[in-house]
Image (cartoon, coloured by chain):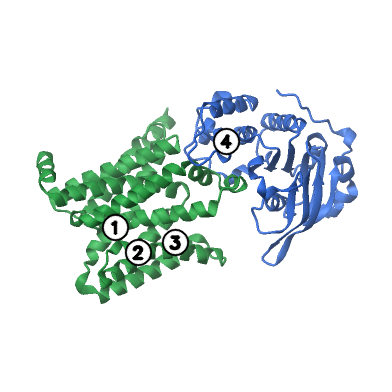
Chain colours: A green, B blue
């Protein structure tokens, strides 16, 4: 079956596009996911991924690539959450709930209005096999932006994530760093929509990073592990999706979750199984 | 010389600090004391420009916000996520980060400096452990090691002795004494009044407004303490306390 998949990849350009896009998405979600997990912003990732729906619908209506509309609404959601949070006593998680549910409702309404041209299932759950050349190019551009910014400002991201007060006292622009990470999160989320869809993109952002968190002793190691887990899961997910005719997003998420479950129980020192054995001794 | 001029902080239309004017001479350790909610931590944050405020803070005649790379700040350790994947040595090396340019990475020299700082706080043998594996006192010593390699002239510490054992407390106060003797100016938010003579050269006594500041013997009087805390507290005389021991153990 694997030989068949490899020969199909060699033969079909749509499968090559899907494979390249899956690997890139796995890597960049793994990278940004680490900062999201360590900053306690998992809900924010979920919110932005759901909030892009109106942008996707409007893009379809205007006949432009969904990327642009989705990115715009993702940024609006991130800014809207920050605005509600900073200008009231409402806590961050409540602000997230208010903004993302309203954006999602608006998105579903717009999708319903433009029903003839949009496949809601594909938006919600993704289909990497339908990735076009233009989508792949945009994904590569997003990946380049994300990786360059993270590499150049790694120190600043690390310090402000670990100890934001020390970072601010030392003169680092911690708010700018926060919003830069939000912009990168939005770009990565939007780029991942075709692969895993609006509903499941948060899994690709959070689960590989959370798995690496159980294993890594340094942020740099965590980022590398998270990227490898993300890319590996995306490739295996694509293989299973293509071979058994299953929705790509769902399969990728299940593969990632399986890796997390194994790590959760068996990770050296931190795994639950070892902890139970140690406690019994 | 550290000076504040009219530092005022207002939260939700309520004054948290009211026009604080004070001076701290260089090479001294000053304790900031006062009851809960007196604005001790807020004063440090206002000096560091971390909270909205009016008034200015100057260090050696220049605005403090223009010389951020020459200051260190350790906030209460409970505000830092110790489950972060980080080795002890890497946590100390963070102290170098503000002085590096974006693409510059800490090199061998930073590692050597971090190892020396860890030796000073008696934590060298733990340098490859995860910070999550340390006790509260050990982690506080790591934060002090990070401050040492920052090599700043001005150091702010917020409640560094809360929840730590006496060994860690002694190591930290002796190291701070050594830094002060080299001309560093150190401000410490502190709540344990019994040790003010032992630990500090001077005090800043607050309760939203400035009650008094200056030498410990001038500030730590029954009258001032009653004014700040609103209750009579038995004030130990300076003779009863011991002088700060600046030798390193």
At mark 3, the secondary structure is helix
Percent x, y of residue B133? 52, 33
CB atoms of marks 4 and 2 within 8 Å: no
CB atoms of marks 1 and 2 within 8 Å: yes
Q: Nearer the viewer, residue B66 or B216?
A: B66
Measured Cα–Cα span from mark 4 to mark 2: 40 Å
Q: Residue at 50%, 32% (x, y): give it.
A: B87
- Tag 1 and tag 3 share a subunit: yes
Does residue B228 sit above or below B134 in this rendering? below
Visible residue check, residue A251 = yes
Pinpoint the chain carrying mark 3.
A
CB atoms of marks 1 and 3 within 8 Å: no
Q: Nearer the viewer, residue B110 or A121?
A: B110
At mark 1, the secondary structure is helix
**How many badges with numbers are in the image?**
4
Q: Residues within 10 Å of mark 3 (few under 14, many from 20)?
A: many
């Amino acid at each position: 079956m694997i030989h068949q998949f490899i020969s199909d990849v060699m033969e079909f350009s749509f499968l090559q596009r899907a494979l390249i896009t899956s690997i890139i998405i796995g890597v960049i979600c793994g990278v940004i996911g680490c900062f999201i997990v360590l900053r306690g912003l998992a809900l924010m990732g979920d919110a932005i991924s759901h909030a892009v729906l109106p942008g996707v619908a409007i893009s379809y209506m205007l006949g432009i690539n969904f990327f642009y509309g989705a990115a715009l609404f993702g940024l609006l959601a991130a800014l809207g959450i920050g605005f509600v949070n900073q200008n009231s006593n409402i806590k961050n998680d409540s602000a997230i709930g208010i903004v993302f549910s309203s954006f999602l409702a608006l998105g579903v309404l717009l999708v319903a209005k433009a029903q003839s041209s949009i496949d809601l299932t594909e938006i919600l759950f993704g289909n990497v096999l339908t990735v076009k050349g233009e989508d792949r190019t945009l994904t590569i551009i997003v990946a380049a932006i994300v990786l360059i910014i993270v590499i150049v400002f790694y120190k600043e991201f690390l310090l402000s994530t670990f100890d934001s007060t020390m970072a601010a006292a030392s003169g680092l622009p911690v708010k700018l760093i926060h919003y830069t990470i939000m912009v990168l999160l939005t770009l990565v989320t939007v780029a991942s929509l075709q692969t895993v869809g609006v509903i499941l993109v948060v899994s690709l952002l959070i689960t590989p990073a959370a798995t690496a968190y159980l294993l890594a002793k340094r942020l740099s190691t965590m980022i590398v592990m998270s990227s490898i887990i993300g890319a590996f899961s995306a490739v295996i997910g694509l293989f299973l999706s293509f071979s058994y005719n299953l929705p790509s997003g769902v399969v990728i998420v299940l593969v990632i979750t399986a890796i997390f479950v194994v790590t959760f129980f068996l990770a050296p020192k931190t795994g639950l199984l070892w902890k139970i054995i140690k406690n019994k001794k | 010389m550290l000076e504040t001029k009219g530092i005022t902080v207002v939260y939700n239309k309520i004054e948290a600090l009211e026009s604080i004017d004070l001076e701290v001479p260089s090479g001294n350790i000053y304790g900031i004391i006062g009851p809960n909610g007196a604005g001790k931590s807020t004063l440090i944050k206002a000096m560091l420009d971390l909270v909205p405020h009016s008034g200015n803070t100057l260090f050696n005649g220049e605005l403090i916000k223009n010389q951020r790379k020459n200051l260190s700040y350790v906030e209460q350790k409970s505000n830092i996520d110790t489950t972060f994947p980080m080795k002890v040595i890497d946590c100390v090396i963070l102290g170098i980060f503000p002085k590096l340019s974006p693409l510059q990475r800490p090199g061998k020299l930073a590692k050597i400096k971090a190892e020396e700082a860890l030796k000073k706080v008696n934590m060298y043998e733990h340098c490859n452990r995860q910070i999550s594996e340390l006790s509260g006192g050990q982690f506080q010593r790591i934060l002090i090691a990070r401050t040492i390699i920052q090599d700043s002239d001005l150091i702010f510490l917020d409640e560094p002795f809360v929840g730590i054992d006496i060994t860690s407390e002694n190591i930290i106060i002796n190291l701070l004494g050594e830094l002060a003797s080299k001309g560093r100016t150190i401000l410490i938010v502190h709540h344990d009044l019994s040790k003010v003579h032992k630990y500090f050269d001077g005090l800043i006594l607050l309760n939203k407004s400035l009650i008094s500041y200056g030498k410990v013997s001038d500030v730590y009087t029954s009258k001032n303490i009653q004014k700040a805390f609103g209750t009579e507290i038995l004030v130990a005389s300076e003779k009863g306390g011991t002088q700060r021991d600046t030798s390193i153990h």
